[in-house]
Image (tube, rainbow, N blue to C red):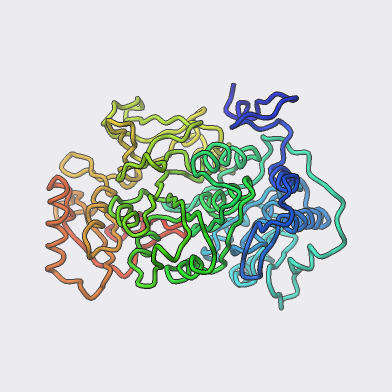
Amino acid sequence: MTVAEAACATQPVAPAPMGAVPRDYNFADDVLQSNLDAGRANKPAYIDARGTHTYAQLADRVARFGAALRGLGVKREERVLLALLDTIDWPTAFLGCLKAGIVAVPVNTLLTEDDYRFMLADSRAKCLVVSEALFTRFEKLINHSPDLEHVIVSGDNPRGYRLFEDLIGADEPEPYTAPTTCDDIAFWLYTSGSTGKPKGAVHVHASLKLTADLYGTPVAGLKESDVCYSVAKLFFAYGLGNAMTFPLTVGATTVLNAERPTPDGVAALLRKHPITVFFAVPTFYAAFLASPNAPQKSEVKIRRCISAGEALPEDIARRWKERYGIEISDGLGTTEMLHIYLTNAPGATKYGTTGKPVPGYEIKLVGDDGNPVKKGEMGELYVRGPTSAIMYWNNREKTRSTFQGEWTRSGDKYIEDADGYYVCCGRQDDMLKVSGMYVSPFEVEAALSSHPDVLEAAVVGWNDEQKLIKPKAFVVLKSPEKANDALVLALQDHVKQKLAPYKYPRWIEFRKDLPKTATGKIQRFKLRAEGK
């Protein structure tokens, strides 16, 4: 039985067990109707700058948007590119596409005109839905995208294109849900570009429900009474689960923020709303701890904190627990697997590790020879589970390399310790070989980040005078005015005290910030390129 068949396996007359999805299935219809059937019609589903939006209002907006797309002539399986800020229009458009059987392609809102040119051409999107604030990055592309027929603008629109609110405010639509199956393509997510050109990972309807069944409810522990906030935006696979799939599945409420998250901005949200489940990335946790305006423990209602995107340094996890009394459940997920499949769990957290496999997923570590490594040895992480993307769109070579039967290559290097916890060593492309021995950049970064003056660090391979690879660190300080040669020596000694001496960074360069994707991942390949 294939993974897809296993995901769809169910008895037609009995309730579907945990981790199973009926053959005939539409995620948007299922998640919205189940909330209405549970009596949550008047309960807040989303809160954004415009106000509060109930489950009934969300279901109505979704139905109207799907009907509007069909009225424009957008057909099942055609693509709609969504370049939207995090407002109520985001879940409206995404779920509206799915309900109508149309493929949603949400994209990063912080990209360049060239990036969007590529994505419009690659997806062959028939319709573009774009926030007014982002429109200028698409304006020159619209008339040069031969497949694009319709443009819908969320917000004010002085340019004469269709307005989102006008479109869904038309006559009440006929009830309609596309007769999709669990294996029907529902949406794409472009990879974040942390290792180069993005690829369109293609996902099916079943995968959204399965991430909620396997992680969101039993592991993340979301409940109907929760109020959720995700620093990671909805266009990111991590944020999609945090701010849409998981809370909607249990009938919780989600706070959305259209602005780019900053420590001060998020602090204001935490003081304003009774947020109980907080999702962020390691770099944000570090910045938040360093902010003088961060709220005190008594000012917040948080009961669960979750991290993903990159491995969480032990020092940040410990300082957060000391300040707020809450463990950060650090996990690993990828765009290809849709959400977290390896994680620490409350009460079973081991700092400095990424935890153990989420039930329903299997993990193996593979050496350079293609064979599984022994416990305690480093290998590339492969994962097997029912939420894997089915392919990269229009990229057969990368598809065959990444999706190997039921196993998906993560590109991450890990070690399984004696207790069965997995320790991150960094991306395979980021690994360094110094004096014939592998060095994990993450290990050196974690050592640097434990110094009281360091906010964050990135380590890459750099050529010395003999063209031999040695570690170089790029460091962001909490107080930039402290940068001097004496601190360089102090940081090098600090690393030598924590790690084997050959791992210390031979060079340290202080930076105001580090290049990152919009999802908070450090783009080490850009730093490496500076040394070529």
Q: For residue 22, say whether it is visible.
A: yes
Q: Position of residue 37 (x, y in %)?
A: 75, 45
Please tell me which residue is depicted at 38% across the width and 64% down the height of the picture: 288
Q: How many numbered markers are drawn?
A: 0
Q: Quadrant of residue 25?
A: top right
Residue 397 position (above or below residue 97):
above
- Residue beneath the point at 44% across and 66% down: 299
Among the 4 quarters of the image, the one containing residue 382: top left
Q: Position of residue 281 (x, y in %)?
A: 42, 55
Horizontal side of residue 164 vs 212, given as left or right: right
Instruction: Please indicate, yes or no, whether residue 77 appears anywhere in the rendered image.
Output: no
Quadrant occupied by the C terminus: bottom left
- From this view, report whether residue 343 is shown above or below residue 228: above
Quadrant in the picture for residue 134:
bottom right
Residue drawn where x is 45% and y is 29% of the image: 362
- Farthest residue toward the bottom? 158
x, y (%) of residue 17? 63, 29
Position in image of residue 313 (x %, y %): 31, 51
Name the residue at the top extreme: 1
Quadrant of the drawing holding the N terminus:
top right
Q: Depth check: give the residue in front, 124 or 4.
A: 4
Q: Nearer the viewer, residue 262 or 43?
A: 43
Relative to 124, is 314 on the left or the right? left
